[in-house]
Amino acid sequence: MTKYFRISLLMLLCLAVAHPAFADEGDNRRKRKGHGQTAGNSVIVEPDRTPLQARQGNEMLPIADLGGAGSMSTVRGHGHLNSSYRQGIDVSHYQYTIDWERLAANENISYAYIKATEGSNLTDEYYRQNLEGAHRVGISVGSYHFYRPNVNWRDQLELMKRIVKPEEQDLVPLIDIEKAGGANFVRDLREFVIAVEKVYGKKPLLYTYQNFYNKHLRGAFPDHPWMIACYSTSKPVLSDGQPYMMWQYSCKGRLAGIRGDVDRSCLMDGHALKTLKM
């Protein structure tokens, strides 16, 4: 009996080690939290991934097709422009902890837009960590706010002002516009954009996807820089001929230092990162 007991105990120990409960802590954390953000004791699932209408194929375009290298500035801190490449990313809590040193050492990335705030009461839990990490490795940093059309724009501005400090930015703020709502959607959005410009002293970069722009924002902001999402091998086409300076061409980028998918973008021909310098 002693012999069989020892064999059984050994088998149980082997099963315990192989059981999914002993898998990577990050995977367990992902299952517990989902792709959401905590607010108090609840979990808020945020729909700030570009909607399905824009997903016309998720292949990442080759870096060689999207721009070459320049010269990297040696300046660090506020206003630092990394002009080595024309490629960038945007990140949030969806990417969890990023190994910024590994990313900078292995990938041709010059800029990163980092999620800071959403609506009037949500702050991305990884914002400070990502901001400091990107600065540390010399990647030009900008912060973005996810705009909620049914939330008072003045309250959204107050949150953004508290979290996104001008002196910590290399690039102008980005406003992520993916949701429409109410008869005054464009009017209120315009008031918000004007107010952001007054606070930060520069026109913000506006982000949306091709179909959303053509349906809701056509002609609304002709004097602002745009990042347009269109996950296709063909460049975005805006129905009013509005020029855009960045193309977010993939939501399925795979990069060293980032576990899972990441949004990738590039500067378009004729545009330079210095246009967005704070």
Image: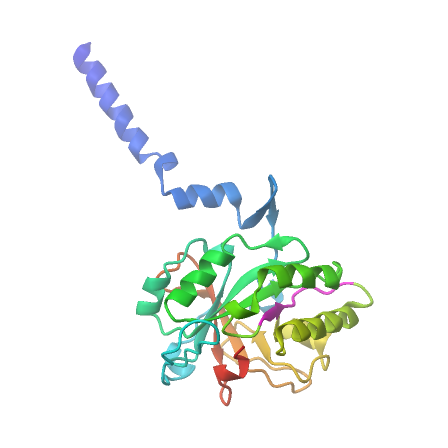
Name the side, left or right, on which 267 lies relative to 40: left
Residue 255 placement (x, y as % from top left) = 37, 65
Would you identify the image quadrant in which residue 224 lies? bottom right
Residue located at (54% from left, 77% from top): 278
Q: Residue furthest top?
A: 1
Name the side, left or right, on which 149 lies relative to 65: right
Q: Report how many numbered discs are placed on residues in the image.
A: 0
* Residue 269 part of the magenta segment: no
Would you identify the image quadrant in which residue 261 lies? bottom left
Residue 93 placement (x, y as % from top left) = 50, 55
Overall secondary structure of the magenta stretch? loop
What is the magenta range? Answer: 173-181
Residue located at (44% from left, 78% from top): 81
Query: In the image shown, does 242 or 171 lie closer to the viewer?
Result: 171
Residue located at (22% from left, 14% from top): 5
Residue located at (18% from left, 11% from top): 2
